[in-house]
Amino acid sequence: MVPMFGRSTSELYDIFNTTLHDLYTRHAVRVQTVNQPWVDHDAFAHAVFLRGGLPYIWAFIDGTIKKVCKPGVGQQHLCSGHKCIHGVKYQHTMAPNGLVVHCFGPFEGRQPDAVMYHDSGIDAHLQPLRSADGSQLALYGDGGYALRPWLFTPFRNANTQDKRDFNAMMAQARICVEWGFGKVSTLFAFVNYYANQKFFLQPLGQYFTVATILGNCHTCLYGSEIGSFFGLTPPPQWKSTCSKVEHLYFSMDRYPCKRNIVNTGVVHQLLSLEKCHVMTRY
């Protein structure tokens, strides 16, 4: 990228990290609480119900682990015995309109999802949520989470046909959170490049959080498989931020080699993080 932008490697590195930190500082709040102003819990619950889900389930929660370069110290904290890798975990709460409502991480790779859920502090935000008729609203997660009034999970001992049918029905809806993780990994392949994911040397949490925020921007601009599945569209509140990101894409498409848009180029590097493939062609 040195010939493209006419700057040294150290300059590009500083610009990239400064831009990353700025995006994180300004916009991380957009994915740090489930009480976002654009969240319509009742509409989300109705959309999930129409796809065969339980009433009052308004979003889905799950964790993922991202492999990292094996550290020289503290390996025991990052070692996942289940996956047999060194990694860090992240947690997404996915709304049925295709946007990530809450992102938490990085977290120790050795810990289960239930511990990550507890440490995220999301319980305090979920407990007060009520529908228009006063019923408790809830998330739905996999069997790795503990059952709560505001967090439903599959039947662990599905020894009847009704229980098996319930688990299968909810699994078809819950898969959307996996699509969300897949979209972030597809758009930002760098978060999966474990050889350059160094836990003690790089801000891995900022990488993944900013990738999640920009993934939300992509959803607002171009839609998503999740929104199509549930028949919902992103809220207009995201449009102002997303239009600025869209302007950066078009700037790069029209003027890919101008030195006077180095900052735009580095933001574009953050958006694709590999080989200048513009995200608008996803």
Image (cartoon, rainbow, N blue to C red):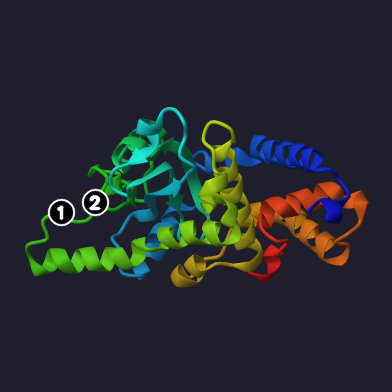
Give how far across and how far down residue 135 sits, in percent.
Answer: 30, 48
Residue at screen point 26% across, 68% down: 169
Disc assigned to residue 170: none
Residue 238 against residue 18 in the figure, above or below: below
Question: Is residue 280 found left or right of 198 in the rendered image?
Answer: right
Amino acid found under the numbered disc labelled 2: Gly
* Residue located farthest toward the left when viewing the structure as drawn: 159
Q: Is residue 34 visible?
A: no
Give the labeled residue for mark 2: 143
SS at circle 1: loop
Q: Quadrant of the C terminus?
A: bottom right
Give the residue drawn at x 73%, y 61%.
276
Return the residue nearer the eye: 266 or 151: 266
Crowding around mark 1 (Cα neighbors within 10 Å: few <14, some 14 to 19, many 20+) is: few
Crowd rating for badge 2 (residues with CA inside 10 Å; few <14, some 14–19, many 20+)? some
Residue 143 percent location from the top left of the image:
24, 51
Mark 2–mark 1 Cα distance, whole angstroms, equals 7 Å
**Which of marks 1 and 2 precedes in the sequence?**
2
Q: Is residue 93 visible?
A: yes
**Percent x, y of residue 121:** 40, 32
Of all residues, the one furthest to the front in this rendering is 72
- Quarter of the figure with residue 159: bottom left
Does residue 201 appear to the left or right of 182 in the view shown? right
Q: Which of these two is toward me, 247 or 208?
A: 208
Amino acid type at image mark 1: Arg
At x 70%, y 61%, the residue is 275
Where on the picture, by quarter, is residue 158? bottom left
Q: Are marks 2 and 1 in contact (CB under 8 Å)?
A: yes
The x, y position of residue 214, in whole percent, is: 63, 52
Residue at (15%, 66%) from the top-left corner?
Answer: 164
Considering depth in this image, is 36 or 203 the residue closer to the camera?
203
> Which residue matches tag 1?
156
